[in-house]
């Protein structure tokens, strides 16, 4: 497995691969791999000739009171897991390598960010699209892989790729879950044993909300209230939001044949968990 820490060396390798007409799959991550990351890698390995995993904890997407310093890191373990998955290369730049000077151009996301996590994390997605623009230009992937657990991020990246005509295919991969339904996340390590058991109710509540919607309930407030009540009743977490929106537009739904997202965020003592279900409202007509 090849390891690159220099932008110039990564670009050189990418140019060589493209000259050989090989497809490049990119899995952008912040490291501390879990099964969700490995699922993305497997998807990339199945589709592309050469797979690059990037590991970079991007400071631009963390707010002043967020967990940048506490974000879990374990490079040695990550490299072993990537190699075990058969990944061809890992790109691990430092902050100094990625941002040697203060950027003179600032990227700003203007749509799909005033809801869900974006409404509580001003500037977060500006940082996401900035680092992804750099990664896309450095690695020039044929395909880029993202988990549907971070569905708002996936929607924003969809806009980035389309608005700026990046010559790549965006691949969304379904959320990796524990056997009990809990969405896998690097932040799960911060949950206490009791909180881990409680957190299962996030998925249970979302599933109950989905069944209400597919059953014909067309009052979004009713669905949101039911989902919220289930989590409040069965967990010690604080519900930050529950929203039901069109996807990937992330706008008010029209209750027709359209794809929607039911999403929520719950703050536990040391971990903020997000989860969602994406489905089509017309499904109930066929059940």
Image (cartoon, grey):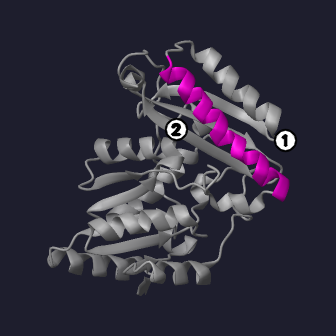
Pick the residue in front: 177 or 63: 177
At mark 1, the secondary structure is loop
**Is residue 277 within the magenta segment?**
no
Residue 110 seen in the current view: no
The image quadrant where one finds the C terminus is: top left
Q: Badges 1 and 2: C-beta atoms under 8 Å apart?
A: no
Seen from this angle, which residue lies furthest front? 287
The correct choice, above or below, for 132 with respect to 93 in the image is: above
Report which quarter residue 78 is drawn in. Answer: bottom right
> Mark 1 Cα within 10 Å, few/some/many (few <14, many 20+)?
some
Residue at (38, 16) in percent of width and height:
256
Q: Which mark is residue 68?
A: none
Residue 210 lies in the magenta-colored region: yes
Q: Residue 194 or 264: which is nearer the viewer?
A: 194
Residue 280 image position (x, y, % from top left): 40, 29
Q: Nearer the viewer, residue 50 or 107?
A: 50
Residue 274 percent location from the top left of the image: 63, 44
Q: Main secondary structure of the magenta part?
A: helix
Residue under the point 57% across and 54% down: 177
Q: Please, what secondary structure does the residue beneath circle 2 have?
A: strand
- Position of residue 52 relative to residue 104, above or below, is below
Q: Which residue is mark 1?
A: 236
Quadrant location of the N terminus?
A: bottom left
* Residue 10 drawn at (x, y percent): 36, 78
For label 2, the residue is 277
Magenta residues, start to end? 192-215
């Amino acid at each position: 497995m090849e390891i690159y820490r220099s932008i110039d060396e990564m670009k050189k390798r990418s140019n060589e691969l493209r000259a050989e007409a090989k497809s490049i799959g990119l899995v952008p991550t912040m490291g501390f791999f879990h099964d969700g990351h490995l699922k993305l890698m497997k998807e990339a390995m199945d589709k592309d000739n050469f797979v690059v995993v990037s590991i970079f904890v991007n400071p631009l997407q963390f707010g002043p009171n967020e967990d940048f310093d506490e974000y879990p890191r374990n490079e040695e373990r990550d490299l072993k897991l990537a190699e075990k998955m058969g990944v061809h290369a890992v790109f691990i730049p430092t902050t100094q390598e990625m941002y040697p000077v203060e950027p003179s151009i600032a990227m700003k996301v203007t749509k799909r960010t005033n809801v869900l996590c974006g409404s509580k994390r001003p500037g977060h997605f500006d940082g996401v699209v900035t680092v992804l623009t750099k990664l896309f230009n450095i690695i020039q992937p044929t395909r880029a892989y993202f988990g549907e657990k971070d569905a708002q991020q996936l929607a924003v990246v969809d806009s980035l790729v389309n608005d700026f005509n990046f010559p790549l295919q965006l691949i969304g991969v379904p959320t990796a879950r524990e056997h009990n339904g809990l969405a896998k996340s690097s932040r799960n390590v911060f949950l206490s044993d009791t909180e881990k058991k409680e957190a299962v109710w996030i998925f249970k509540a979302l599933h109950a909300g989905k069944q209400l919607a597919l059953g014909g309930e067309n009052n979004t407030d009713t669905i949101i209230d039911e989902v919220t009540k289930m989590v409040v009743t069965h967990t010690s977490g604080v519900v930050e939001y529950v929203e039901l929106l069109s996807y990937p537009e992330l706008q008010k739904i029209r209750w027709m044949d359209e794809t929607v997202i039911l999403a929520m965020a719950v703050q536990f003592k040391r971990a903020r968990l997000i989860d969602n279900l994406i489905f089509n409202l017309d499904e109930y007509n066929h059940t």
